[in-house]
Image (tube, rainbow, N blue to C red):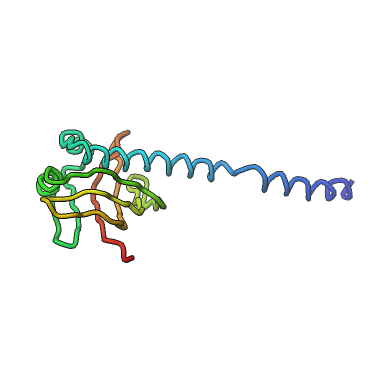
Amino acid sequence: MRRIAWSFLPLAALIALAVPSRSLAQSRDEITKFRNRESAVWESVKNKELDAIRKVFDKDYVAVYDYGIVSLPEELNGMSKVTLRDYKLTDLKLRHLDGTNVLVAYKVTVDGDMDGQSMSGSYNALTLWRRSGNQWYVAAHSEVKAKP
């Protein structure tokens, strides 16, 4: 009887390796959800939909850029001066801080300008998403121009 059980072990191991784990599938699904959330914010910036952005940003939102630390009103003012023609998000990575906070790190390539100055290029970005009830809000964001 032992011999029969042991003979099935290699087959069971192969099946386990071939079938994606539930956590891996959830992880892919979760990355897709956060990619969609990030893309929706970028699309709102592109379309200058400041009311849509205001609804998804936390009231205590803060951002860190090379020119300083900004609050939500300052961020919205800056976004109103942006002309974003195109953007592409890549290499998303998620880090769960706890049950209600998720960090999303990614690369974004943009084609656009702000106040007539080109801001086109590649950036490394980090967004802190905070869940309140069933809704996710942007609590913090940062972008750093990527070195070539």
> Who's the residue at 87% across and 49% down the image?
2
> Who's the residue at 26% across and 49% down the image?
111
> Who's the residue at 78% across and 49% down the image?
9
Q: Position of residue 103 (x, y in %)?
A: 34, 51
> Who's the residue at 49% across and 41% down the image?
26
Q: Position of residue 17 (x, y in %)?
A: 67, 48
Relative placement, left or right, of 8 versus 43 is: right
The one of 102 and 81 positioned closer to us in this rendering: 81
Relative placement, left or right, of 135 versus 29 is: left
Relative placement, left or right, of 79 versus 128 is: left
Residue found at the very far bottom of the displayed protein: 147
Quadrant, the C terminus: bottom left
Q: Position of residue 123 (x, y in %)?
A: 29, 57
Relative placement, left or right, of 120 versus 117 is: right
The one of 135 and 125 positioned closer to us in this rendering: 125
Number of on-image labels: 0
In which quadrant of the rendered view does residue 119 lie? bottom left
